[in-house]
C-alpha cells in the first residue's frame, strides 16, 4: 500500500514537472527579449521614415494646382480648333534710355511662348483639316489687338488664332536666321529712316510723320496659302524681290536695328527685280 502511494506521488511529481516545463516557455510566447524588441522598433521607425521621405519628394496634387481666372480646375487647358494658348512676355514700353514712346509702341506686336494649341481648323466647305503651323515651345509674335486675354496659373496668357500670327521664331532672340514666316506671310525690309527731336530723342520716321512703309525688299516668305482641300498655294515672291504693298496692310517690327514689314501675299500689289526705287 505504501509502495503504491509512493508510486502515485512520483507519478504526480513527474506530471507537474512535465507540465511546468511545457508552460514555462508559453508565458513568454510572442514576447521578444528587450534588445530584440528595441531593434525591431528602430527598424520600423527607419522604414517609416524612408516611406515619409519618399512621399515628401514625390509631387502631390497640392503642388500642381491649375487655375483659370483664379479658379482651380482639374486638368490643363487644351485649345480647340485653330486656337493657340500663348504665355505672354512682359511688354517693353521704354527705350534703352528710359524714354516712353507710346505713339511708336501702340502698333508693336505682342510676343509670347506657345503653351498649347488645337489640331487646326476645318475648312467650312470641304471639311478638310488645315493643320497648325506652330509647335509647343515656339515663340510667336501676334497682333496686339487680337485674341482673348486670360489669367492662367497666375500668369497672363492669351488665346489667339493662327490667323493672328505675325511670325514664329526659336531661340533666345529674334533674328533673320531664327525666324520662320507662317502661311502666306511675307517679311519685307523697308527703307525707313530716323529723325531726331529737339531734345535729341531718335524716333522712327513713321512715328514722326504718321506714315507706314508701302514697299521694300523681300527677306523671307511663308510656305504659302492653304487651299480648300489642303493643298498649298505657293508664294509668288522670293527672297531678294522688291514688292509694293497696301500702305496700311503690314505689321511693322524692328529686328537688330532694321525696320521690317510683315504683309500677306494678298496685300502685295506689285513686284520687280533689281534695285529698289
Image: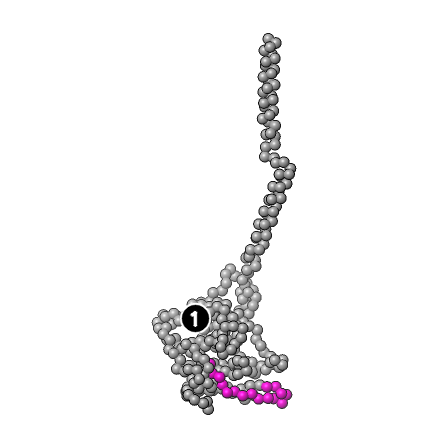
Question: Viewer-proximal residue, 144 or 15?
Answer: 15
Q: Where 241 sits versus 133, above or below?
A: below
Q: Where 79 sits versus 222, above or below?
A: above
Looking at the image, residue 227 sits to the left or right of residue 8; the answer is left
Please report the residue visible at 56 percent of the width from the left and 80 percent of the height from the top.
105
Residue 198: say if magenta.
yes
Residue 253: say if magenta.
no
Q: Quadrant of residue 233?
A: bottom left
Question: Viewer-proximal residue, 65 or 125?
Answer: 65
Of all residues shown, which one is farthest toward the right?
Answer: 34
Residue 274 percent location from the top left of the image = 43, 89
Please report the residue visible at 52 percent of the width from the left and 76 percent of the height from the top.
174
Q: Which residues are magenta?
A: 187-202
Question: Viewer-proximal residue, 67 or 198?
Answer: 198
What kind of colouring is applied to the model shown?
one colour
Looking at the image, residue 128 sits to the left or right of residue 187; the answer is left
Residue 135 percent location from the top left of the image = 46, 69
Q: Quadrant of residue 82?
A: bottom left
Tag 1 residue: 132
Q: Residues within 10 Å of mark 1 (few under 14, many from 20)?
A: some
Please report the residue visible at 57 percent of the width from the left and 66 percent of the height from the top.
154
Q: Where 209 sits versus 5, above or below?
A: below
The reply to whether residue 3 is visible in this rendering is yes
Provide the secondary structure element on which disc 1 rests.
Answer: loop
Please report the residue visible at 47 percent of the width from the left and 86 percent of the height from the top.
216
Residue 75 percent location from the top left of the image = 50, 61
How many numbered circles are shown?
1
The reply to whether residue 146 is visible in this rendering is no
Amino acid at each position: 500500500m505504501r509502495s503504491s502511494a509512493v508510486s502515485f506521488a512520483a507519478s504526480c511529481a513527474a506530471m507537474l514537472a512535465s507540465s511546468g516545463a511545457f508552460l514555462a516557455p508559453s508565458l513568454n510566447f510572442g514576447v521578444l527579449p528587450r534588445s530584440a524588441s528595441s531593434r525591431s522598433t528602430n527598424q520600423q521607425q527607419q522604414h517609416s521614415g524612408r516611406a515619409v521621405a519618399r512621399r515628401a519628394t514625390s509631387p502631390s496634387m497640392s503642388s500642381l494646382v491649375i487655375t483659370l481666372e483664379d479658379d482651380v480646375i482639374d486638368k490643363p487647358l487644351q485649345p480647340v480648333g485653330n486656337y493657340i494658348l500663348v504665355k505672354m512676355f512682359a511688354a517693353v514700353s521704354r527705350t534703352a534710355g528710359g524714354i516712353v514712346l507710346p505713339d511708336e509702341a501702340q502698333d508693336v506686336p505682342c510676343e509670347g511662348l506657345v503653351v498649347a494649341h488645337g489640331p487646326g481648323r476645318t475648312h467650312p466647305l470641304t471639311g478638310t483639316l488645315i493643320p497648325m503651323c506652330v509647335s509647343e515651345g515656339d515663340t510667336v509674335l501676334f497682333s496686339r489687338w487680337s485674341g482673348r486675354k486670360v489669367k492662367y496659373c497666375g500668369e497672363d496668357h492669351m488665346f489667339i488664332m493662327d490667323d493672328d500670327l505675325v511670325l514664329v521664331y526659336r531661340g533666345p532672340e529674334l533674328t533673320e536666321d531664327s525666324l520662320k514666316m507662317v502661311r502666306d506671310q511675307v517679311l519685307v525690309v523697308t527703307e525707313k529712316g530716323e529723325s531726331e527731336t529737339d531734345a535729341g530723342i531718335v524716333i522712327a520716321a513713321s512715328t514722326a510723320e504718321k506714315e507706314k512703309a508701302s514697299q521694300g525688299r523681300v527677306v523671307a516668305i511663308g510656305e504659302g496659302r492653304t487651299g480648300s482641300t489642303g493643298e498649298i498655294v505657293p508664294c509668288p515672291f522670293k527672297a531678294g524681290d522688291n514688292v509694293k504693298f497696301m500702305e496700311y496692310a503690314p505689321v511693322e517690327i524692328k529686328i537688330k536695328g532694321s525696320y521690317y514689314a510683315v504683309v500677306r501675299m494678298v496685300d502685295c500689289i506689285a513686284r520687280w527685280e533689281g534695285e529698289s526705287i
